[in-house]
Image (spheres, rainbow, N blue to C red):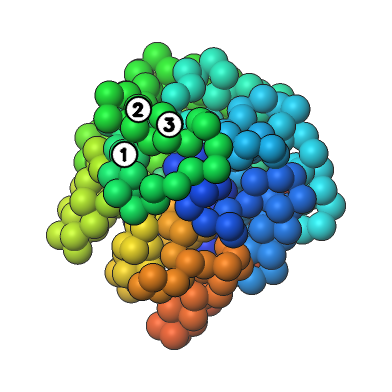
Amino acid sequence: MAKNRKVIITCAVTGAIHTPSMSPYLPVTPDEIIDAAVGAAEAGAALVHVHARNPKTGQPDQSPEAFEPFLKVIKQRSNCVINITTGGAPTMLVEERLKPCAHFKPEVASLNMGSMNFGLYPMLNRFKEFKHDWERPYLEGSDDRVFKNTFKDIANILTTCAENGTRFEIECYDIGHLYTLAHFVDRGLVKPPFFVQSVFGLLGGIGPHPEDVMHMKRTADRLFGDDYHWSVLGAGRHQLPIAAMAVAMGGNLRVGLEDSLWLGPGQLAKSNADQVRAARQIVEGLGLEIATPDDAREQLQLKG
Ligand code: KMH
Ligand code: ZN
């Protein structure tokens, strides 16, 4: 792992996992996404990872028109690095998912390193009443849905975005995804330094046990040496414990309502900024400094 000791906090402000009925604080409209992103950046996030939603229904929307109303304003109001999703939602195919990145040519885009099951249906046990018609089938449907990211899909994203100087938040949900990254390094399609975002605790991916975190880091160290920056995200209640583990091990972290709606047991996070502040406390409590957006640009060699 590359040795930088300023810790990069990424905040993923809304995503496509959670649905509006799960939390009144989930950003949905462009104004809510702007406030969430700017608030997270002011609280200490160097990168802000964004998805768009239909402002009336909250359904994930991957059209460039859905991103347009908030991207420009976030840029005007903050120096944070904007990271646009190419994951979109697990219901979408890669051609649709690529459109906003191809159009807006961001500094960073997410890149999902393999096809997988993406189990959202257990949330039906916790959240039962839904405001919008799409929410229940979206969650139920994940019982028989594959989040498709074939080798061809990955190569397509790499070549389309790399032409624009976009670099990647490389989402690895399991150990095999690190080996897939190594394969694309061998093919010359992705260049160091890699920003590896390890995802723990999603149903269908690696678990959230400390041994899982150790195994992910050990494998990435063996495959990539000093050529990668390591970041982690823990799903749901695992968010802060996993962040704390990784920061103590020299890594970076991601928080945000995309990955967890919670601030503590039974306590919904009222904003993305609240989660960033909680993560920042961990970082600073360990005697470490958080990275500014320009520190992150330098560390990750972004185009700026
Ligand atoms: N929802 C995260 C676990 C993407 O947007 O490309 C992964 C993610 C995918 O952020
Ligand atoms: Zn995302």
Marks 3 and 1, how far apart at CA: 8 Å
Q: Secondary structure at mark 2?
A: helix
Contact (Cβ within 8 Å) of mark 1 with mark 2:
yes
Residue 252 placement (x, y as % from top left): 43, 62
Front residue of this view, candidates 143 and 194: 143
Marks 3 and 2, how far apart at CA: 5 Å
Contact (Cβ within 8 Å) of mark 3 with mark 2:
yes
Q: Which sits earlier in the primary sequence, circle 3 or circle 1?
A: 1
Q: Is residue 132 left or right of residue 120?
A: right
Q: Which sits earlier in the primary sequence, circle 1 or circle 2?
A: 1
Q: Is residue 111 left or right of residue 173?
A: right
Q: Amino acid at mark 2?
A: Gly
Contact (Cβ within 8 Å) of mark 3 with mark 1:
no
**Residue placed at 27% from the left, 30% from the top?**
143
**Residue that label 2 marks:** 141
Residue 124 placement (x, y as % from top left): 34, 44
Would residue 283 be seen by someone viewing this image from the given angle? no
Pointer 3: residues within 10 angstroms few (<14), some, or many (20+)?
Answer: some
Q: Secondary structure at mark 3?
A: helix
Would residue 207 be seen by someone viewing this image from the given angle? yes
Residue 271 placement (x, y as % from top left): 60, 65
Marks 1 and 2, how far apart at CA: 7 Å
Q: Amino acid at mark 3?
A: Tyr
